[in-house]
Image: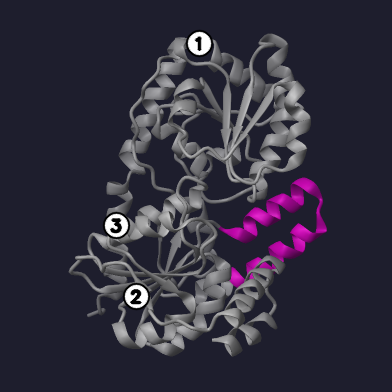
């Protein structure tokens, strides 16, 4: 495995992927003793054995990608025997224990080859471009009969391309091109692609028309709607700020949108919740921005805020923070990119506005209109219930796996 990682680092990967793999290589050099290949109690699913590989143990309360992966694993475990291998464990053991409780065995990616030989997996799910880029070839060689599912999350090269257009950053443009080549190779080499949204699926169909695909978006459990319009105040943004579109959204809100809103509502505040908030957010404190950092229990904050705001200026897939807000019945104002892939109708499930003036006007309209607020709360909540719950997406996940591993007649 060490020699494999050394060789892979020489390939034309995005810088973030190279740094990620270098960290893992350093870890392996320090500790090459892997006495137990997996931990946890195997699931009782009677279906085939499924291998899932991702960057880290999911921490569902910290980022939308983790929440999605946790619910994917939970859905798979109901019908299959699932082993989940990761590169690192950035947070406490309680996150891994949560997987054991739902029947997921966990282990280290370094042991993938021995596990493939022992378990006779029917399929391997490789999540994110860096992980799939590192493992697709080696996993294919370890068992040529194994069906490989490339779980994209979103089209990473599209997100970087949009960032380059927005910011003029040549590094983002170069990153987009590297990611485009990597994602193309992975799409062509996989047996099935899990796409994050319908627009992503259409794009990948043009890139790899022979590779079947299904949409596996973010997954959202429904939550109790606790507070009325009159019991709520202020605006809310939630995101993990190691993800660049989230930091950009807060800067955009604080500099260009919130001042317009505060002309009409001078006491209104923007609450910013999430891991890894950059220190420069502190400069917005006097402008009505309250940075709360990581909050393990969002329920009281969501129950106390009146409007969720999400002006996402570059990205792809579906935006998990929007689905999370709607799953609590919290109405959302977003923009065209934020609404992409959700199947929204402007003014029905959410309000959609792109310019600072239009966005601020939409927030004020929703913030001061109890009837509109209630209609969007009801419609958004129903949209999640009908399309994005674990029951709905879990069926898509398991049916796609069954189709992938069933021999063609």
User: What's the magenta bit mostly, secondary-structure-wise?
Assistant: helix
Q: Quadrant of residue 183?
A: bottom right
> What is the distance, in whole Å, between disc 2 and disc 3 at their CAs?
22 Å
Residue 123 badge: 2
**Which stretch is magenta?**
155-183
Mark 2 in CB contact with mark 3 (< 8 angstroms) = no
Placement of 270 over or under 120, stated as above or below: above
Q: Earlier in the sequence, mark 2 or mark 3?
A: 3
* Image side of residue 175 versus residue 61, left or right: right
Q: Quadrant of the C terminus?
A: bottom left
Residue visible at 39% across and 55% down? 70
Q: Earlier in the sequence, mark 1 or mark 3?
A: 3
Placement of 293 over or under 353, stated as above or below: below
Q: Residues within 10 Å of mark 3 (few under 14, many from 20)?
A: some
Q: Nearer the viewer, residue 208 or 234?
A: 234
> Is disc 1 placed on a helix, strand or loop?
loop
Q: Earlier in the sequence, mark 1 or mark 2?
A: 2
Q: Give the x, y percent position of residue 403.
A: 28, 69
Residue corresponding to mark 1? 369
> Is disc 3 placed on a helix, strand or loop?
helix
Q: Nearer the viewer, residue 29 or 140?
A: 29
* Image side of residue 121 versus residue 336, left or right: left
Mark 1 in CB contact with mark 2 (< 8 angstroms) = no
> What is the distance, in whole Å, between disc 1 and disc 3 at their CAs?
44 Å
> Is disc 2 placed on a helix, strand or loop?
strand
Residue 101 badge: 3
**Magenta stretch contains residue 172:** yes
Q: Give the x, y percent position of residue 134.
A: 56, 77
Mark 1 in CB contact with mark 3 (< 8 angstroms) = no
Residue visible at 46% across and 17% down? 373
């Amino acid at each position: 495995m060490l020699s494999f990682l050394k060789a892979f680092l020489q390939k034309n990967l995005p810088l973030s992927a190279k740094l990620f793999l270098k960290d893992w290589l350093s870890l392996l050099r320090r500790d090459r003793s892997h006495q137990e290949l997996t931990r946890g109690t195997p699931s009782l699913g009677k279906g085939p054995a499924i291998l899932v590989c991702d960057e880290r143990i999911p921490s569902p309360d910290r980022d939308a990608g983790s929440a999605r992966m946790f619910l994917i694993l939970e859905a798979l475990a109901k019908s299959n025997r699932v082993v989940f291998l990761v590169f690192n464990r950035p947070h406490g053991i309680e996150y891994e224990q949560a997987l054991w409780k739902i029947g997921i065995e966990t282990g280290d990616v370094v042991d993938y080859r021995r596990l493939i030989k022992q378990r006779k997996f029917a399929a391997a799910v490789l999540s994110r471009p860096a992980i799939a880029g590192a493992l697709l070839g080696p996993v294919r060689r370890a068992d040529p009969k194994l069906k490989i599912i490339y779980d994209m999350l979103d089209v990473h090269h599209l997100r970087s391309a949009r960032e380059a257009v927005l910011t003029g950053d040549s590094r983002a443009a170069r990153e987009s091109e590297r990611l485009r080549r990597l994602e193309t190779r992975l799409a062509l080499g996989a047996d099935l692609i899990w796409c994050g949204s319908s627009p992503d699926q259409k794009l990948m169909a043009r890139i790899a028309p022979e590779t079947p695909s299904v949409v596996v978006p973010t997954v959202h459990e429904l939550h109790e709607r606790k507070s009325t319009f009159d019991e709520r105040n202020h605006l809310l943004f939630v995101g993990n700020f190691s993800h660049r579109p989230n930091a950009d959204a807060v800067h955009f809100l604080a500099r260009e949108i919130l001042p317009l809103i505060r002309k009409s509502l001078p006491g209104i505040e923007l609450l910013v919740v999430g891991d890894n908030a950059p220190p420069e957010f502190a400069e917005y404190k006097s402008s009505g921005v309250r940075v709360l950092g990581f909050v393990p229990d969002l329920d009281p904050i969501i129950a106390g805020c009146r409007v969720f705001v999400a002006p996402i200026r570059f990205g792809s897939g579906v935006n998990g923070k929007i689905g999370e807000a709607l799953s609590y019945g919290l109405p959302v104002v977003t923009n065209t990119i934020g609404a992409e892939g959700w199947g929204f109708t402007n003014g029905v499930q959410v309000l959609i506005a792109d310019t600072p003036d239009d966005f601020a006007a939409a927030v004020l309209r929703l913030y001061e209109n109890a009837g509109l607020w209630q209609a969007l709360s009801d419609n958004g909540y129903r949209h999640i219930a009908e399309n994005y719950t674990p029951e709905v997406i879990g069926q898509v996940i398991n049916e796609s796996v069954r189709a992938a591993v069933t021999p063609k007649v």
